[in-house]
Structures are given as structure tokens and as C-alpha cells.
Image (cartoon, rainbow, N blue to C red):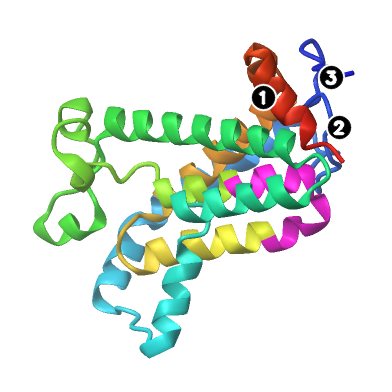
Amino acid sequence: MFHVKTNSRDTGWCRPPVHFDSAWPRWVKLLMCAVFLAVAFVLDKPMAFWAYHHPIVFQSDINLEMTMLMQWGQWTCSVLVILAVALLDKQGRRKAVALAVACLCTVAICYLTKGLCGRARPWLLEKGVYGFFGPAYGFLRGATYQSFPSAHASGAFALAAGLSWFYPNGRGLFYFLALDTAFQRVVRHAHYPADVTAGAIMAVLVVRSVLWWNWPGHVIAALPESGQRWIRAGDK
């Protein structure tokens, strides 16, 4: 019988995994996040100037490969990965719904924060433009004033955190790909270190919260009976 544990702190079909940081007190995790973000802000200008004056140019196919890796967690990559989970895992449709809900929540919060902050991109630093300019810039002047947080880093770490929840044995690989995405966004002069750090912290926090509080289970429970039957039919 199909059942969604809407009052449970798991996803209704998969208990929370044992993460490398599970034994750490919550205050320690929050303190570490605050320290990482503070250090990143200190490094913002030096790293931006370095990236501007020392552009890293990858040649030929290497550039294509690096660009592809930088798209980890973006729309096409995420859709393909979620489809693969739906097709290959014995409870793939349920897990695909969970990943989709978690990633979409991250995207929504990321772009709302971008608009509210209105931070100028690193490429404006050479013109003396640096800082947060608020919603008037963030919502009305496009991507040039939407540097904080990084959507690439948010998407990469959201996908990594979601996959790590269901497949913890692969979390090293998932987070390595996310870190590569964040690193490339900085060295390609598209973001400050604080942008990618904030994006990573926000994504992991949102995804874990969504799955911990079983939002996907509530979404599934709210579907019409035909939708629930379709999801149930994917169980093997």
C-alpha cells in the first residue's frame, strides 16, 4: 500500500544518511559556516584582482571538458541526473520527485536572495564598482548585479547534497564536482569567493531541510490519485 509519512522526519522511503558531519553539534556547523563566509569576504577583492590579471585559458577539448564540468548542477545536468535516478533506482520516481523539489526550492531562494542583495559582479571592480546595491539593482539591472549568491554554486551543491542524501557512498564525488564548479566560477572572474561560499552553504542547508522535513512526501501526498499511482508504479 502506498504511504507517505507526512509527520516523519525522513522522506517516507529513505532514512537520512550518515554524513561525515552528523556527529558535530549544530552550533559547530553554523560557526564553521560563518567563519568560512567571513574569510571568503576577506578574500573577495584579492581573488577578483588575481583572476582578472591572471586569466586561466584552457585549450581545445580541455576547455570544453572544464566548461561541461562547471555545469554540474545546472538545468540540463540536473534534469538528466534526476531522470537517470528515476529510471535506474528501484524507488527512482520517489527519489526523483524529492531531488526535483529540493533543487527547485534552492533555485527559488537563490534568485530571490540575488535580487534582494543586488551585488555587483567582479568584472565591475576594475571600474571601481563594488558592493551590495539592494533590490533596485538586483531585480531591475539583470545579471550584472546578481552576483551574491552564485547560482552555479547553489545548483551544484544542491544536486550534490540531494544525491548524497540518497547515495551517501558517492558523496565524495558529488561534492568534488560541486567544488570544481565553485572554483571555476571564481577563477573565470564571474563570482567572488563569498558568492560561491554563500551559495554552497545555502544549498546544503535548504536541501537537507527540505528532505529532513519531508516536503517531497507532502508534495506526493497532494498529487491526484493518478499521479500517486504513477509514482508507485515505479517501485521495483
Q: Residue flagged by tag 1: what amino acid is it?
A: Pro
> For the residue carrying disc 1, how many other residues have a C-alpha within 10 Å: few (<14), some (14-19), or many (20+)?
many
Q: Where does the magenta region start and end?
A: 159-173
Which residue is drawn at the image coordinates 32% and 35% (left, top)?
A: 114
| Quadrant housing residue 52 | bottom left
* Of the pair 89 and 109, the residue shown nearer to us: 89
The vertical placement of 236 against 185, above or below, is above
Tally of numbered discs: 3
Which residue is drawn at the image coordinates 45% and 36% (left, top)?
A: 107
Q: Are the residues tagged 3 and 1 within 8 Å (C-beta)?
A: no
> For the residue carrying disc 3, how many other residues have a C-alpha within 10 Å: few (<14), some (14-19), or many (20+)?
few
| Residue 167 within the segment the image draws in magenta | yes
Q: Are the residues tagged 2 and 3 within 8 Å (C-beta)?
A: no
Which callout, 3 or 1, points at the residue further toward the start of the chain?
3
Q: CA distance from mark 3 to mark 1?
A: 14 Å
* Residue positioned most to the right: 1
Q: Which mark is residue 2?
A: 3
Which residue is drawn at the image coordinates 62% and 49% (left, top)?
A: 83
Which residue is drawn at the image coordinates 39% and 61% (left, top)?
A: 185
Question: Does the magenta stretch mainly form a helix, a strand or a loop?
Answer: helix
Q: CA distance from mark 2 to mark 3?
A: 17 Å
For the residues carrying marks 2 and 1, which lies nearer the camera in this image? 1
Which residue corresponds to mark 1? 216
Horizontal and vertical percent position of residue 82: 62, 47
Q: Residue flagged by tag 2: what amino acid is it?
A: Arg
* Of the pair 102 and 24, the residue shown nearer to us: 102
Which residue corresponds to mark 2? 15
**Visible residue check, residue 197:** no
Q: Quadrant of the N terminus?
A: top right
